[in-house]
Amino acid sequence: MAAFVLTLAQPAHAVSPGPDPCVRLAPGSEVPEPRNLRSERGVLALDLSIHNYREADGSVRYCYLLADGTQAPALRLGAGELLILRLRNDLTDIGMAQGGPGSPGGHDHSAHAHAAPATDPCTSGAMTPVSTNLHFHGLTVPPVCHQDDVLRTSVQPGDGPFEYRFRVPRDQPPGLYWYHPHIHGFSSQQVSGGASGPMIIEGLERATPDVAGLPERVLVIRDQSLLNPAAPPSSSEPVVPKMLIDRDGDAANNGTGFGKPAKDLSINFVPVPYPDYPPAIMRMRPGERQLWRVVNACSVTYLNLAVVFGHTPQRLGLVAIDGVPMNAPFGRSPPVTWIDHIGVPPGARVEFIVQGPPAGTPALFVTRAVDTGQGGENDPNRALAALVARADAPEPQSRLPLSSAPLPAPARPWLGEVAPVRVRHFYFSEKLKDPKDPNSATDFYITEEGKTPAPFDPAATVPDVLARQGDVEDWIIENRSTELHAFHIHQLHFVLVGWSGLPVNEPFLRDTVNVPYFRAQMLEYPSVRLRMDFRDPNTVGTFVYHCHLLEHEDGGMMGTIRVEPAAAAPAAAR
Ligand SMILES: [Cu+2]
């Protein structure tokens, strides 16, 4: 159930003035590829600005732009290389989330007038609708200002360019990562508005020779408020129970796989709107093998990706999850796992080999329904893109290199076989602000067992968890709510070693994992057991773990961890 603030009456705000900097393609357009920005001589330097714009229908778009207006470029660099990203905040206060329909229109309402003067972006921690920052999801870089801190770093519209500068670790696995804003309370609004972009650490073919030389496509799937919220379901769908609406106005899971979705989806900014889901177009050469690199950049929508020719699901060759090749760096998993659908929670990435259809065969890239639980959003079956096979189809802009010098051997033993020094227990839970009023807003919690559930407190000076660099811990995370949550922790990857008390054999890494939902007839709460890796010195510092359904994160489902240096006194025993 998505539930906290944004239940504003529509649309008391005027359209933003001037041209829309976050222009979107029409439904049914060909899927564009993001512009590739590649490192040169070991450095990728760029200037990026973030913008927003209110549409005539009241919806608000956000976007990252290069100086020439290019949206959401793909940042591509190698392990060991330097990223220098100067972020300028061009957000304007267009009346979102701050008490509703008071502000008369966006014009003459420049956020520059509101920006607090001379606050230090490294320490302000400001959380306003026009504050922003960047999180580099999946990278093991230090949680400090100018690198990957999201707790205190907050850039305001008056601040001028703010520099992010870090070196990608030499042992960062090659694969697909992503960048997005992470201001507590406003993450969902900015990300569902479109603020996100892909980042690729080069060299996947060094771990997985099967992909060497393949053409590649980077696909960012985002969600957004419905373009046609009042439309009845398409007449081609089966009749489903009457729509339920959760307290945020999203369509609630009806358990059928059909009906109105909570959000529309887009693929590289081509919307595929309810109710008819006109697919975007992807041209391929008949039978061509490609590597698809897919980010689930949705704020709240689960994906379950498949490719169908006619009605027949096709084999997809999964090679990487969450930026890490399946077989890297230990070779404990096959380099390619052939499956016919792939579940992807919000925040996660998957990279897989696809074979194009024969000429003339109708083919679709789809997401199948996801059962998010009785309390979850409706994520029905729907198309994303039609695959059109023609001999004269243009080739993707990029191909993986043919040469494939193997990756260096790992420096540390395989995480899955390291004994944890301690086990911690956490649980996801939800509570109505007014238990007597089923329409009141919901608080969202992630709580360590034994403590009192409380929403994330940005003013807290004591971290929720103390750990020590060099340690490996097991975290058991229960779900005591009736909807799915997606656990994510910054700065590190983990191994899923257990599922509701049963051992799991997943000899690969993740940074985001689905936590199954509770049903009333269950005897125990469902859970995941994760082997958490604090061995890397870059994990030293204070950072966050949270649910990656951003309405939940913004609603309080987040905690802080401080990892102390190995040389310091032992972390408080628990
Ligand atoms: Cu959640």
Image (cartoon, helix red, strand yellow):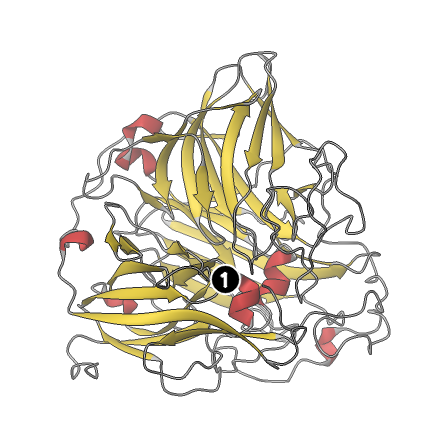
Q: Pointer 1: what residue?
A: 482
In front: 452, or 541? Answer: 452
In front: 34, or 222? Answer: 222
| Residue 402 visible in this rendered orientation of the protein | no
- Residue 90, how many percent across, how many down? 67, 66
Seen at 46% across and 71% down, the residue is 429
In the rendered view, does 462 fall on the left or right side of 331?
A: right
Q: SS of the residue at dot 1?
A: loop
| Residue 161 visible in this rendered orientation of the protein | yes
For the C terminus, which image quadrant? bottom left
- Residue 555, how many percent across, how many down? 55, 73
- Residue 293, how many percent across, how many down? 46, 38
Res. 4 image quadrant? bottom right
In the rendered view, does 536 fall on the left or right side of 517?
A: left
In front: 136, or 12? Answer: 12
Crowd around label 1: few <14 · some 14–19 · many ≥20 (10 Å): some
Res. 467 image quadrant? bottom left
For the N terminus, which image quadrant? bottom right
Compared to residue 295, the image places residue 499 above or below, namely below
In the rendered view, does 42 fall on the left or right side of 295?
A: left
- Residue 417, how many percent across, how many down? 14, 53
